[in-house]
Amino acid sequence: MALSITGICEGRISIGAIPGVGRQWLPDIIKGFSVNYPKVSYDLVHGVAEEIQKELCGGRIDCGLTTAFPVSHELKFTPLYEDEFIVLLPAGHFLADREEIGLSEIAGEPLILPDSRLDSSLEDIFIRNHFTPNIYLRGRDEISMLKMIENGLGIGVLSGLGIGGLPISDGVVCRRFQERYVRVVGISVRKNQKQPLLTDKFTEFAGTYIKKAAGC
């Protein structure tokens, strides 16, 4: 757990991160933070949003890079980034030549979706738009899901951060939704208690980095 000795920012901090976020952002965040605070070491916990929030509420990690859905009443969530959902189609699919795709156009298509415990943002989008997905497969491993899309097993709906930095073959075509659906990503800490100096400094640094990455 985060420890600040005599007001000096040093010690060990435990950070939770959902898939994609940890892969895309954490290496640069930790590298930059370590330049300013070289006496800090790290524990990383990777998991879905539900797991990260449980670890936070239980006091087993200090902060979490996670999504807005669901947010426990025990946590303070600071929104930082809108992560756009992307449609991924097998090359040769009849929708692959479209520049943008409407949600209604994939009705009835077999869908390959992230595990709903990653966060419930996608389910919330479906409910708000009265859309009933034909779910063929759910998973946590984006690389495996990309291979299944490439093999024509279904259409994927994944977030930009979720697939960022992954090798995407010519057999997969990425398209935006016409409606621009997003999930909100940010930093969570425990509410109504004073955070250690190390946690405060890290979340401030990470928040600044993410806002810059978002172009804010």
Image (cartoon, rainbow, N blue to C red):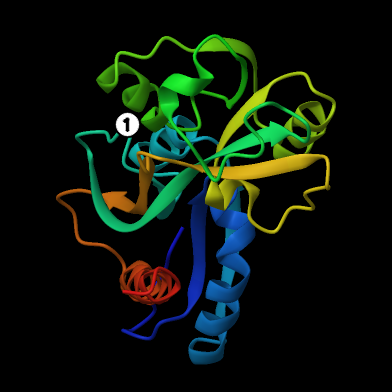
In the rendered image, the vertical position of residue 200 relative to residue 19, given as above or below: below
Any part of residue 174 in sight: yes
Nearer to me, 183 or 78: 183
Nearer to me, 139 or 85: 85
**Residue 153 in the image: x percent, y percent?**
77, 18
Would you say 52 lies left or right of 75 here? right
In the rendered image, the vertical position of residue 37 relative to residue 102, given as above or below: below
Q: What element carries label 1?
A: loop
The residue sitting at 83% across, 47% down in the picture is 170
User: In the displayed image of the protein, which residue is found farthest to the bottom?
Assistant: 36
Any part of residue 39 in sight: no
In the rendered image, the vertical position of residue 48 relative to residue 127, given as above or below: below
Q: What residue type is labelled 1?
A: Pro
**Residue 208 in the image: x percent, y percent?**
35, 76
The residue sitting at 40% across, 40% down in the picture is 178
Would you say 157 lies left or right of 82 here? right
**Dot 1 corresponds to which residue?**
70
